[in-house]
Image (spheres, coloured by chain):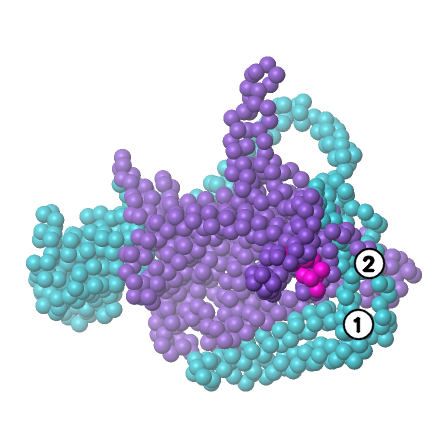
Chain colours: A cyan, B purple
Amino acid sequence: MSSESRPRIPRTPDSVEAPTGTDSHGDDSLLLAGHNDPIPDPGLPEHEYRPTDVDPAMERRAERQVAGMFILASLLIVAFCVAYFAFSPSPTGQTFHGFALSNLTLGLTLGLAMLLIGVGVIQWAKKLMTDHEIVEYRHSAASTAEDRDEALVAFHQGAEESGFGRRALVRNSLIGSLALLGLPAVVMLRDLGPLPGNALSTTVWKKGIRVVNDVSGAPIKPQDVEIGQLINAEPALFFDEKNADGTVTPAAFAGTDLQVEKVKAAVIVVRMQPEDITPLPSRAGWGVQGILCYSKICTHVGCPISLWEQQTHHLLCPCHQSTFDLADNGKVLFGPAARPLPQLHIGTDKDGYLIAMSGFEEPVGPSFWERG
Amino acid sequence: MSTTTAKPVGASAGAGKAGGPVAWIDDRVGLGGVLKKQLRKVFPDHWSFMLGEIALWSFVILLLTGVFLTLWFKPSMDEVTYMGSYANLRGVSMSEAYASTLNLSFDVRGGLLMRQMHHWAANLFLASMTIHMLRVFFTGAFRKPRELNWLIGLGLLQLGIIEGFAGYSLPDDLLSGVGLRIASGLMLSIPVVGSYVSFFVFGGQFPGDIFISRLYTVHVLLVPGILLGLIGAHMLLLVYHKHTQWPGPGRTNNNVVGYPLMPVYMAKAGGYFFIVFGVTALMSALMQINPIWMYGPYDPSKVSAGSQPDWYMGWLEGALRIMPSWEIHAWGFTLSLNVLVPGVLLMGLLFTVLGAYPFIERWITGDNREHHLLDRPRNQPTRTAFGVAGITAYGLLWVAGGNDILATTFHLSIETITYVMRVMVFVGPVLAFIIARRWAIALQRHDRDTVLHGYETGVIVRSPTGAYSEIHAPVSPERAFILTAQENNQPLLLSSAEDGNGVPAPSQGKERIRARLSRFWYADDVSKPTGEELDEAAHHAHADSLDPASDRHLGIETGGQLGGDDFDLEQTGPRH
């Protein structure tokens, strides 16, 4: 809209434009009781003219402002393209006060360009577009009673002509067959996954498997573990093993299988003062010189636990803060976990390295219905 | 611009530049009938109506940036050895999903910007939907005829949460992997079928090798498709019902006052898209989000301390953290209430309550009329109090979700925080309810006083007798009208308890509960002043002003001058 075509002094002193469309009146049944009570509706306030409506200089200034923003945005869009080719996103690319220059320049140019376009358009709407408020009337959301009646008549006629109500045999057999269609939809999903079986209750641990460092795969000798130390450990099956003759036995698990077994088999090895430990009678010989081994998987929802408080023998889960006492059979001291950490019975093999003396006696990790 | 569309679109009448194309398209699809009504459709102006718009535009940004990301992201859990340009992880074995996300961040120009914009926009999407929903709740915009749109909105919020969590999980980094591990733990807690659910979802034991590609389809096709459909329905209903408006002079329950869609709202709303986009881009330029390269690939035996989910999962995380360790073992089965209640049932409870709320309120208040004028929250003290109680419960759970961060930041004991939260999560909402309700009622009373006695000018005068008093000045007629535009809420009365023969009505018990609830709902509300009370107050004010010893009010004439307003309450009436 060019500034010349618009009257400088507005058309009517009326604040309200004629309502649009053919509606000249709303649905009075929608009016709420007490609308004019106790103070009558003063009616729409008078339209107030903006400086840009009455002062041509202000109007031209607003025009320049808006166009200025659009032009600046155009320059920034070009700058975005330049930045795209100028800077590398690589971690070794240029930085500016710690910001990667590629991301910084692309984001700033694009962001400011978009912002300027948006602000410019809204400024245009607020300062230059006609700002007369207009009134539109509402009608009840419902259709008219006649329309509703006619629709119902049409529906009944259709229902009658179809015989849906009368022909019970046809109708019921159709409903029956359609209902059965739900079955294939469910049955087809059966192969989404195998049945759980006892997979949640078993781990790869069994008698004789060495307990090894989870990073290096190195076996652990009791004398190498200091009192108060915690070692994240895994079964030796997860690592390639060097044999005495120099050959290498590859790890028993790799890729997805390794991830799946790690979820259950990760353990921690801790050494405490033997006199601090208060084992259950059934677990009396489960450690080696104050070294105990527990599942690393929280019995709450399965996070790996690793925050170890040396002095108190407490192990804290970083996800939901369940706290277990490793000197007291992995008992839950605090937090949402309901069951103690499962303990692995360990001993040493003929070379003096820590090994499992059996598998876990109970399922590790979060509870599930058939766990018992 | 506006003149061309206001004229009928016909062969020659379609004057102006748009006439040609409009005629062409109208000859084929006959849009004239719709356009003539909708192009000048009126939308009312208020800042709070913009919140839903932020959600809409964030969704558009999510679609745009998301499409860009799909061009490089590989939704695969196959193990590869990373050889890209991020030196710290070179040679490390990781899933293709994680490797391709690293690639997007460090080897695709603009990839990091798009990733960060996608993540920021997702957080913004959920935040704006949540706040928009609160706006709708507190102003009563969910009332008839908009209950269905309230339900659609709730569906959008739930799907948004699922969509956000799915997207957060796709890169298969250590943080999101732990999140999925927790999700699998939640599934396992479902009674009877839990382990089956987990095995079917993950294609076997967690994490398996297929979940990321399944999740990818859910994230880029299934959920966005439903979101798009629901957003369309949400907007269509908005257009059909016409937007609600705040009460004000000339604004009634059967009209809508504002600016036309074309040109003003097209410009304002369209321009707003660019602003939301611009702000999201600036945030992504300056504020790092989800630096997955710092977390490393997912390894089930690793986790980092201080792990936090995205903000919208925080309240569930908090519930999971403060839930006592209740687990039932019976008949060879385990029921993990410690996981099931906060992790599965709580979300169901929240959305059930929210979904049922409009219908519960309508039953209690017995109000079956259409409402297009918004409530000021103070004029519905009980609803407002329920809303504040809900926010309090949500906020407390959210705070509990950061109990470890609070403990380390403020050197508090994590046990103390947790025990306090266990109590507060029940006590807090009750206190908030009571305070908010009384506060709203006090504000109602304040409105009533303002209409009757004017507002406090802050001008203190000393009377000849030495007494000090503050001058009250009447508010403008527009303001006075707004302050009395609400209806007086009346509790439902129990209709006659027995019929003519002394036989109790069949639905008596239900009605009795309803009447009692309605009394609880409305009985304490403050009524707006009546006409007589207004007259009396105005008269009183005049009398005061004539009495030099008065220390309460000064005359309307005096006050009028001070207040810059020549309105006299006694001459209340339409001015033109």
Name the N-terminal-most of marks 1 and 2. 2
Determine which residue is flagged by label 1. Answer: A53
- Please identify the residue farthest to the front as the structure is shown: B465
Q: Chain of mark 1?
A: A
Q: Residue at x 58, y 75 (%)?
A: A111
Where the N terminus of chain A falls, by quadrant? Answer: bottom right
Q: Residue at x 51, y 51 (%)?
A: B439
Determine which residue is flagged by label 2. Answer: A17
Q: Residues within 10 Å of mark 2 (few under 14, many from 20)?
A: few
**What x and y, as percent, mark residue A319?**
33, 59
Residue at disc 1, secondary structure: helix
Residue at disc 2, secondary structure: loop
**What x and y, as percent, mark residue B365?**
59, 38
Between residue A256 and residue A263, name the one nearer to us: A263
The residues tagged by marks 1 and 2 sit, at their Cα atoms, a distance apart of 17 Å
For residue A78, what is the image quadrant?
bottom right
- When the figure is inspected, residue B458 is found, relative to residue B316, above or below; the finding is below
Where the C terminus of chain A falls, by quadrant? Answer: top left
Q: Which residues are magenta?
A: B553-561
Q: Residue type at mark 1?
A: Asp
Tell me: B416 left or right of B15: left
Residue B560 inside the magenta-drawn segment: yes
Q: Residue type at mark 2?
A: Glu
For residue B128, what is the image quadrant?
bottom right
Residue B291 inside the magenta-drawn segment: no
Q: Main secondary structure of the magenta part?
A: helix
Q: Residue at x 10, y 62 (%)?
A: A273
**What x and y, as percent, mark residue B441?**
54, 48
Q: Residue at x 55, y 72 (%)?
A: B281
